[in-house]
Image (cartoon, rainbow, N blue to C red):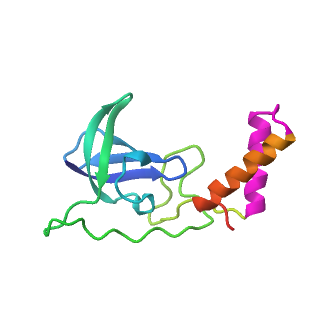
Amino acid sequence: MVAGRVVRFDSARGYGFIAPDGGGEDVFLHVNDMLIPESYVRSGLAVEFEIEDGDRGLKASAVRLPLGPDGNPVAPPPPLPLTRSHALAPNSLAPKAEGDDSLCDVLAADEFLHEVTEALLTAAPSLTGEQILQVRRGMLQFGKKHGWAES
């Protein structure tokens, strides 16, 4: 196991980077390789992890909270609150200003559906109206599940 700290993490994209305590290059972190809830992950969080060679460089796996002196994981930090401000600049993994622990923009259901519809029309203009409605319903459920859309 290697100890390190999360440098940045984009919960909307499901990835970020960890800086090993011993120095060296940052290690790629993917949400699927975490053994802790995603809501705990933020810049500065101390973690332990394995390092693997990934397709594009070093990759973290089995990411977990460090063990305390009693051999049990340290008490996890409280989950971050959801707010209407962006955690990261658009299309970037650059963190926001120091001390801003927000996650992502939470939209009202109608705003969320509007954004999804616009994205679908731009990305796949040949979709039928019925296909768009089906995708919108599924995306709204997905957005609510992840806290991106309000109920």
The percent position of residue 30, horizontal first and vertical second, equals 41, 44
Q: Position of residue 107 (x, y in %)?
A: 69, 62
User: Where's residue 119, x and y in %?
Assistant: 74, 42
Outermost residue toward the right in this view? 129
Quick check: 8 above or below 57? below
SS majority, magenta: helix
Residue at image location 64% in from the left, 61% down from the top: 144
Q: Quadrant of residue 60?
A: top left
Q: Nearer the viewer, residue 76 or 94?
A: 76
Name which residue lies at 54% across and 44% down.
92
Compared with 61, 104 (above or below) is: below
Q: Say whether residue 111 is left or right of residue 31.
A: right
Magenta-colored span: 109-128
Is the residue 100 above or below the residue 117 in the image? Answer: below
Left or right side of 10 for 140: right
Q: Residue furthest left?
A: 69
Q: Is residue 88 left or right of residue 52?
A: right
Residue in the picture at 29% in, 71% down? 75
Whether residue 116 is visible, yes or no, is: no
